[in-house]
Image (cartoon, rainbow, N blue to C red):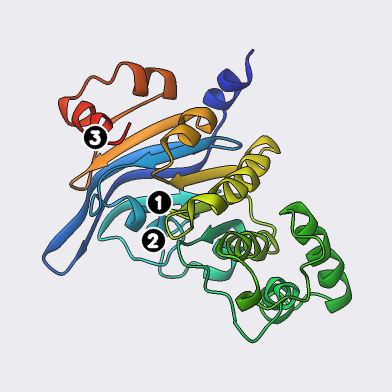
Amino acid sequence: MTENAAKSNAAPIVSIAEVYQSFGDNQVIKGISFDVTKGEVICIIGPSGSGKSTLLRCINGLVEIDSGSIRVKGMAVQDPDLDKLELRKTVGMVFQQYNLFPHKTALQNIMMAPIHVLKQDAGEVKDRAYGLMKKVRLEGKEDFYPGELSGGQQQRVAIARSLAMNPEVMLFDEVTAALDPETVKEVLVTIRDLAEEGMTCLLVTHEMGFARELADHMYFTDNGVIVEHGPPRVFFEAPEDPRTQEFLSQIL
């Protein structure tokens, strides 16, 4: 059995079923459904306002859904009694903006949540934080403050900070959109490393070459619905829906 076949036969680690979400009268997500198996890389693309970033926030419980269900490793995200800490330990999220504490060093930013939220031993957390800095190729930058780092370096610290919670699923919301072209590659290399190590990843991205290379499955959303989806080779080379064809023709 191939690796992709094994993934397709596995039980989903993330399951999204008939999800609707709105902000006031603006319906942003309109009945989206799909499953993600452990170790799978999902890339979601689409125009601005198509609901893709909101969907990631719904998976992490940052935005409440109106109806439908989202389950992460058996946890019902929409359950009002759900322990959000357990969810956040399982699902890490990295945003377009780095949101690092400017008065804390890179190492301190990574250590804060495990120490203050998970109440883990500071010595053990510090050792792990050094390891994470090495993992994101920032060894030697541990004592630098965010303002002393490039945008790409700050984003890699943000990735390491999320990994410090030992998540099983990582959500990346257009994490290269605010970066200079020169620093995009270093962040994408970090994400590629995580994917190759078997991390389950959902990415909202405009990096089409990267998505084509790394994704197991592509989703194109527009106006709150999934217009088309499929494996990258088929999705990019032979899209069926006219809207997908139009979108890809504008960005490729």
Relative to 184, does residue 232 appear above or below in the rendering? above
Real-space CA distance between mark 2 and mark 1, rounded to the nearest whole angstrom: 7 Å
Real-space CA distance between mark 2 and mark 3, rounded to the nearest whole angstrom: 36 Å
Question: Nearer the viewer's eye, disc 1 or disc 3?
Answer: 3
In primary-sequence order, the first of circles 1 and 3 is 1
Q: Position of residue 45 (x, y in %)?
A: 34, 41
Relative to 141, does residue 228 appear above or below in the rendering? above
The answer to which of 76 and 47 lies nearer the viewer is 47
The answer to which of 113 and 6 lies nearer the viewer is 113
Q: Would you say residue 74 is visible in this rendering?
A: no
Amino acid type for the residue under numbered disc 3 = Gln
Label 2 belongs to which residue? 78
Relative to 120, does residue 71 appear above or below in the rendering? above
Q: Position of residue 182 (x, y in %)?
A: 54, 51
Residues at circles 2 and 3 in contact by the CB criterion of under 8 Å: no
39 with respect to 209 (left or right) = right
The answer to which of 42 and 78 lies nearer the viewer is 42
Label 1 belongs to which residue? 70
Real-space CA distance between mark 1 and mark 3, rounded to the nearest whole angstrom: 32 Å
**Which numbered circle lies on residue 250?**
3
